Amino acid sequence: MLSRLLPGAGMCLSAVGLTARYCLFESYIHNLAIIKQKMLLLMWHADIRLVDAEGFLRQLLAKGAG
């Protein structure tokens, strides 16, 4: 179960004490970098969609006024 949540933790499950905690912490840091990259990608796509939506609304207003 834990190895599915933290990919790097699979090797560390047999370890005990400080070593196990270090392995889990290392996995957490690795996953944090991946999550950060995914969030940045989602934000980039959201920004593009907002710009597209703004342009669409401006076109509608221009057609309505013209």
Image: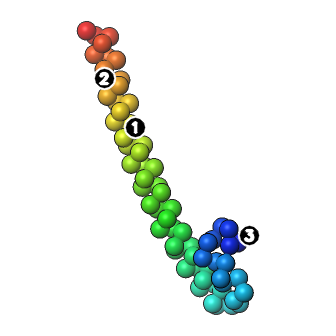
Mark 3 crowdedness (10 Å alpha carbons): few <14, some 14-19, many ≥20: few
| Closer to viewer: mark 1 or mark 2 | 1
Alpha carbon distance from label 3 to label 1: 37 Å
State the image coordinates of residue 48 (x, y, percent, origin top left): 36, 41
Residue position for label 1: 49
Residue drawn at the location 48% of the way across and 57% of the way down: 38
Q: Is residue 19 depicted above or below 3 in this figure?
A: below
Name the secondary structure under disc 3.
loop
What colour-coding does the image apply? Answer: rainbow
Name the quadrant containing residue 21: bottom right
- Image position of 49 (left or right of 4): left
Name the quadrant containing residue 5: bottom right
- Image position of 7 (left or right of 54): right
Residue position for label 2: 58
Marks 3 and 1 in Cβ contact (< 8 Å) = no
Residue position for label 3: 1
Q: Tell me the amino acid under the disc marked 1.
A: Arg
Query: Closer to the N terminus: mark 1 or mark 2?
Result: 1
